[in-house]
Image (spheres, rainbow, N blue to C red):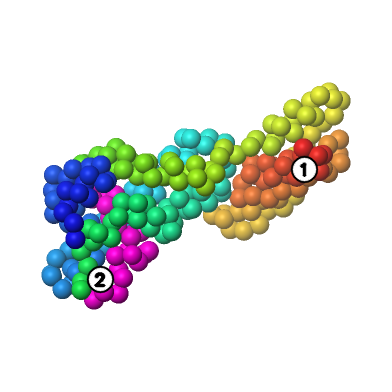
Amino acid sequence: MRPLEEYEKRIGYRFRDKRLLETALTHSSYANENKCKSYERLEFLGDSVLGFVTAEYLFHHFPDLPEGQLTKNRAALVCEKSLCGFSKSLQVGDFLRLSHGEARSGGKNRASILADVFESTTAAIYLDSGSLEQAKKFILQFIVPAAKAQNVRPFKDYKTTLQEIIQQNPEERLEYAVIGESGPDHDKHFTVQVCLNSNVIGKGGGRSKKEAEQQAAREALELMGY
């Protein structure tokens, strides 16, 4: 295991409380053998901090994305595979405190452990600094390039595009109508159709009326050859 100071250089943060950093790198197998704390509680907190920072980033940088797509993009950015990749870039495995058995079984390269430690490191930075800003600085150096690599781009405003096309002929009129609604209040699904002069030119669905309207407009544009 390498010195903690080297890990601090990799993550770009120097801890005031080194014990907090040690805990963030301590697997339960090591903790059980040595009667000390593991990273599990920090992992719990880090998961929430990571989710919030990622959601805030997507919310502010992609203002036209509907709620459903924001949720999907956040999930992709903070899934186990992504977090494991972040930890590998930091070579977290070289700093982990594992039991001999866990180490022999390849724990330092196990995806679930590496993902957990990215979360525990996030929480440790948050608690040690007493500031969300420090945790955010750590998180965004990974989330921002990952978002670009996954082609997370602003949602195209299909409704506006369709409206601009139709407005070229002033006598034409567009109307959107909800033709279906299903699911409980916390998980609604809407179906919307868009009509041009009473003729249906597109249908779409979504978790909100706005999202369904966008999908209906998208279908209409595709049918019109755009």
State which region is magenta: 101-128
Instruction: Reply above or below: 68 against 33.
Output: above
Numbered tag placed on residue 149 in the rendering? none
Query: Could you say whether the residue bearing mark 1 is in a helix, strand or loop?
Result: helix
Asked whether the viewer can see residue 223, the reply is yes
| Frontmost residue, 155 versus 111 | 111
Q: Determine the residue positioned at 64% across, 50% down.
A: 206
Instruction: Give the image location of residue 112, x and y in percent.
Output: 36, 64
Rendered position, 183 above or below 5: below
Mark closest to the chain's N terminus, 2 or 1: 2
Assign the N terminus to one quadrant of the image.
Answer: bottom left
The picture places residue 18, in percent across and down from the top left corner, at: 13, 51
Q: Position of residue 225 (x, y in %)?
A: 81, 39
- Evaluate whether residue 194 shows in this view: no
Q: Is residue 26 above or below residue 216?
A: below
Instruction: Report the residue at 17% width, 52% height from top.
Output: 4
- 190 part of magenta stretch: no
Q: Position of residue 29 (x, y in %)?
A: 22, 71
Comparing marks 2 and 1, which lies closer to the viewer?
2
Residue drawn at point x = 22 percent, y = 50 percent: 7
Q: In front here: 17 or 145?
A: 145
Residue, disc 1: 222
Q: How many marks?
A: 2
Residue type of the residue flagged with mark 1: Glu
Location of mark 2 (residue)? 103
Specify the quadrant of the image occupied by residue 159: top right
Number of other residues with Cα within 10 Å of mark 2, as a class: few under 14, some 14 to 19, many 20 or more: some
> Residue at the spot x=37%, y=41% of the render?
140
> In this image, 12 relative to 182: left or right?
left
**How far apart are the alpha carbons under marks 2 and 1?**
55 Å
Q: Is residue 117 magenta?
A: yes
Q: Which kind of residue does numbered mark 2 sit on?
A: Ala
